[in-house]
Image (cartoon, grey):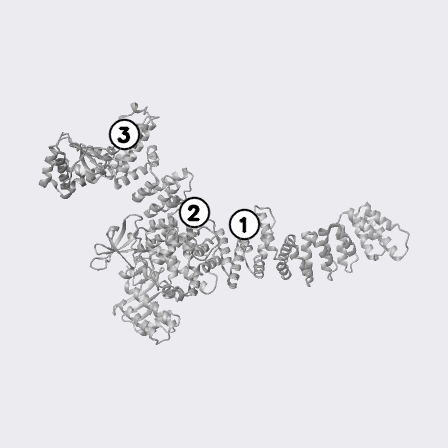
Amino acid sequence: MDAATLVQALAVAWNGFQLYPDPKAVASFMTAVETIGEYAGSPYILTIGVEGFESAGEVVPAQNNAAGRLAQALFAERVENLAIAVAPDAEEVIQFCSLLDQGPDQLDADLDLPTRLQLAGVSAIRVRCHEILKDREEEEADPVDEHAADREPDIQALFEDNAVITLAKRFAHAGSEGAAAEDFVAVYRATYAQVKPGDTKGLQRVVQTFVDAFFRLDHDYRSSIFEAILAVRDEEPFRNFLDQLSAGELLDLSRTVADSALPLLIEYARVVSEMQGHDSGLVEQLVEEGADSRQVVAGSVGLHLARFLNTAAPDEGEARVVEDVRQLPGAPRAGWSVLTDLFALERRPERVGRLLRIWVSKVVASVRARDFASAVRWVDVLESAEVDAQLLNAAYTEAASDEVLAVLSGEGEDDEADVRRELFATLSRRAGGRVIEQLAVEQDPGRRRMLIDLVTEIARIDIRSVLPGLSDPRWFVVRNVAIALGKSARKAAGDPLVKVVGHEDHRVRIEALRALIPCLGVGALDHLVEALADEHVRVRAAASDLLGTLDDEVVVPALSSALGNETLPVEVRIAVIDALRSHRTESARGALRSIAESKARFSPSARTLRSAARDALRSTNG
Amino acid sequence: MGNKAAAEFLASLKRAVSNVHLYPSGHPQSDAALDMLAETAGALTGGFDAVVLSLMDSAFFLDRVLLPQESLEYRDLYRLFQDLGLDSVSIVGRPTIGDLTELAAFLAGEGSDVPVDGTVLLNERPYNRSDLVNLSSMSAIRRSYAASLDFLSGVGESIEGGEDADLSEAVWTVEQLLEQVLLQPGASLLLSTLKTHDEYTFYHSINTSLLALAVGQAIGLNNDQLIELGMGALLHDLGKIRVPSEIIQYPGRLDDDMWAEIKRHPQEGAQAILAGSGDGQEIAALVALEHHARYDMSGYPELGIRAKPHLYSRITSICDIYDALTTRRAYKRAMPPAAALKAIIEGAGSQLDPELVNIFVSILGIFPAGSLVRLDSGEVAVVVAAGGTSDVMTSVVVITADGDRVEKPATFELNAASVVGLLLPEEVGLDPASLVEASHLVG
């Protein structure tokens, strides 16, 4: 007996197991089993090193390749040494070889070879593995378990080393997926119920052991159990169970569960999603679609969960894509960007013209939709573009349509009033002439009033674009512009209006006088008084009326002065008397009285004036 | 499976109709086209029977049998029938050249006589609606595809005519496609393998949109975002309509002028979309402008300062390249899907967004839906539902090891390890998209 013979016997057995379907029918295998049995209880302990088998610190020479392969297989299993405890029979040797050959299966994952041999009932051949330092350190770090003594036996059993595998085997041998699911739910529920209040460690062990056992089961069993758990997902034990599953694991499960269980999964995802304050829109969409599309669920629920439940850390790349989705710019922003690019790229004149037409349509559409902020951004696109000035002006003119300007000039202090005014200012700057022209041809009185309002607003923003209208050869254009300027109340309009006061058409003169008051205030007095002598009776009447609208303090002294001005025609002075009469104030009556009682002149005109003044006094005295 | 005789008849009819416009009567080209038409028409009837080609529900029917694949491939012919008020053409026995000439001339809008020999009958369909529809109707996904073709065709005509395209129906069109992508993702991806040599741009655009929607869905875009993405992908190549077709189809290396013309199509497309799009649809223009810009911004056109193209542009770019690579063109062979994916992966990081490439590949799988593969058993199979990153995918055997066509293919789980070769549709004589109607295959 020597170590080399034992190694040789083991190698022959290993070779026979690997080569033949039924090694027991092979003489060399059976001989090897007998030889191995002869080493039962012997002092020969084979150590497995990087160079193969060793005994007593010496390398045992291998006589064939099988010995090397066997040593490699044992080395891969972290086997430190091997000994023959009792004589094995052929079945036990085959079992040993089989466990070594297959490695840990799904149920046995993470179990070392000695444990697997023990579970399989192989005790004749004993192996010992290298200990993993990390495991030992973790054990040493465990705090004292103060609840251990009070625990129910079923729960305490879960703290045993092989608890997971024992539990998994129970379910795996239930007979069918359905039976396993039923058993799993019942056992888990019952075990969970036995945990005493405050025994957090026990609770964690129950949940974790069942979760671990669940994942040791094969696919069909897992799917079946998962479906059963989804059906009772609202119960605390099962809610805790589901919470242990990562998004990636849920994704895998979603691919295989029955269609009927998919809505439950989606519902679960939705609830958790909402609890965590994440957008559940996609999940809800999936719920509506039902379970008729497995790929939708597999492709979307999983990703959705991975992303939004944060139970699986997305890799950097996926996180970036998610961030991109979150930061997607809205459609208008994309449009501004594209049009800016196109203006920068396009050099063909006809194409630039086309881009300008697109620009106009976008500005108009935004204003119509009352999306003023967007309209400003569209306008900005052109402000930064290098476009021929003539084309640019034409585009602005087209964009500043009556409709657009009317919307922008609307009254009201809505949230976007400032933006609206800014936009109006930008567009109207180049639009005054076009609107005035439109006003000239407009037949509808209502539309005319609207256009005058527009010109008024334009004048408030940019009077220079309106003033040329006062020089228009058509009297009605000048009149309309004068009206608008008056409504604008811009002081800058005063001087241009004064020039129009002498317009050949009396209708223009009337509106010019009327406009002067808001623009010049008392500065308009002289022109009004002068107009009292206009050749046209309607102008005179208008001037008189307008004077009557002004404050006494400024008007009466001016009228009194005009009344005393003997250079003025008598009819003007009579008009002044009429104007004074309308004021009905003491100062006005004083001025009238001074004329009425005057005895200095006896000319016909003086008599006429005195008579008119007396009449006026009588009427003011009642 | 498609009806080969019907497809050949429709192809020869289409050719004969275009030749009416191109060549005078009696020209050898016209005669050759008519001879071919007579041959394919005779093959339909077998020389004795009468067959009826009719239109119903957006589809061609041969007698009572739906022609799903041909209904999409010959969509332009379908529209022509429809515009002329033609709802059926009956071919009786062995049709005469005279009758077929009249038929072609009628369809070309130049005919004045009806076929007089009695071998081609117009609008004398013996079947009523219930006869046809009750048997089978075109699948919803194909109807959406057909509606998209019609929409793009209308847009194309407007742009070719120098008008602004009306894109108001674009959202509706994409919604239909999206609905199908959500309901039938497998069938959608399979249908995205539909290829035609004619009207390449339209088919390519729809395929790109279907693929983009699948990617968008996978990365968690919401419904509105998916529609924006789908619209961008659907319209991304609109600018090509402005590029002369002789350049698009040029069978060789493009010279500088041609290349400059091609490179202008993104901005042409963006202009057309901006001009025709409604409020909130401008992202489609951005996608059109950027889809050749490349991930590292080294492509064309040269755009303003930005780190990378918009997410939708990056998705569209991948789908655009993939569909282009897998399509046979006048100047190049098509690549098998798996080979195209390899090319896509090689472009990741420079030309294409690497993360999106990963997602794209994971959606399409190792062998994307529509892949034609030769197995170690000698059989030829079509992948009908990709397996993501798994090695196993749902497939059907379409040709046996003896070379016989399988008439009623059944699905099986194909392991990638048993694939020994990649094939092209023309090598097999089968268009994978023709399997869409067998909905149980891809459900």
Q: Which mark is residue B377?
A: none
Q: Name the amino acid type tagged 1.
A: Ala
Q: Chain of mark 3?
A: A
Q: Residue furthest bottom?
A: B26
- How many numbered marks does the figure carry? 3
Q: Chain of mark 2?
A: A
Q: Secondary structure at mark 2?
A: helix
Q: Tags 1 and 2 in contact by the CB under 8 Å rule?
A: no
Q: Which mark is residue A373?
A: 1
| Position of the N terminus of chain B by quadrant | bottom left
Q: Chain of mark 1?
A: A
Q: Position of residue A86 (x, y in %)?
A: 13, 30
Which residue matches tag 3?
A158
Q: Secondary structure at mark 3?
A: loop
Q: Position of residue A527 (x, y in %)?
A: 77, 55
Q: Name the amino acid type tagged 3.
A: Leu
Tell me the residue at 55%/51% (across/down): A376
Tell me the residue at 79%/47% (across/down): A584
> Mark 1 or mark 3: which comes first in sequence?
3
